[in-house]
Amino acid sequence: MYSEKVMDHFQNPRNVGEIENASGVGTVGNAKCGDIMRIYLDIDETGVIRDVKFKTFGCGAAVATSSMATELVKGKTVQEAMEVTNKAVMEALDGLPPVKVHCSLLAEEAIHAALWDYAQKNGIQIEGLSKPKSDIHEGEEDEEEEY
Ligand code: FES
């Protein structure tokens, strides 16, 4: 039921870990399944994602999609990273069973939440980016909420 790529990224996830003093950190959760994903981005002064790490407390598909999502955004500009949608992640994994589509959505939202955090910290706007609804913002740093 899972593609070889999904199994590979589940068994050997890429970019697991944390980045200290990350440029942006995003944590999202799915209320229904209770799975949580956190993405750390290290972004250089030209807006290129130099490094990315993730931690996922969730199902196998959540691990595989976060792993693939980190691979897809690495080396991209923040604007290009916006094109890494859940569809792009699923295609790169050769598909997911329909009941697991929401897991890939969580990966997209985790990237968006981390980009949102980066944009907030730097007072910039990223075209097409809004605060993800599932952003659970655990706030390791004391960031102020805007509203
Ligand atoms: Fe919820 Fe996979 S079952 S993220």
Image (spheres, rainbow, N blue to C red):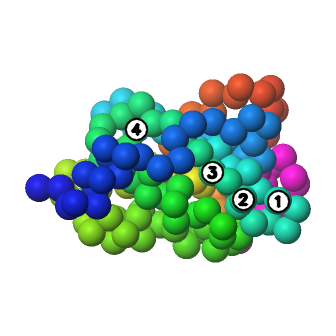
Q: Mark 4 and ligand 1: say if the CB distance to the nearest ligand atom is below 8 Å.
A: yes
Dot 1 falls on a residue whose secondary structure is loop
Residue 82: give x, y in percent of width and height: 60, 68
Residue 48 lies left or right of residue 26; in this view the side is: right
Instruction: Name the residue beneath numbered marker 3.
Output: 52
Find the magenta span and give its range: 116-127
**Residue 136 occupies which quadrant of the picture?**
top right
- Residue 30 is tagged as 4
Question: In 3D space, how far apart are the residues under numbered discs 1 and 3 (Cα atoms)?
Answer: 12 Å
- Mark 4, Cα crowd under 10 Å, few <14 / some 14-19 / many 20+, is some
Instruction: Name the residue beneath numbered marker 1.
Output: 44
- Residue 126 is tagged as none
Q: Are marks 3 and 4 in contact (CB under 8 Å)?
A: no
Does residue 118 lie above or below 82 as drawn?
A: above
> Would you say residue 123 sits in the magenta stretch?
yes
Dot 1 or dot 2: first in sequence order is 1
Q: In which quadrant of the rendered image does the N terminus lie?
A: bottom left
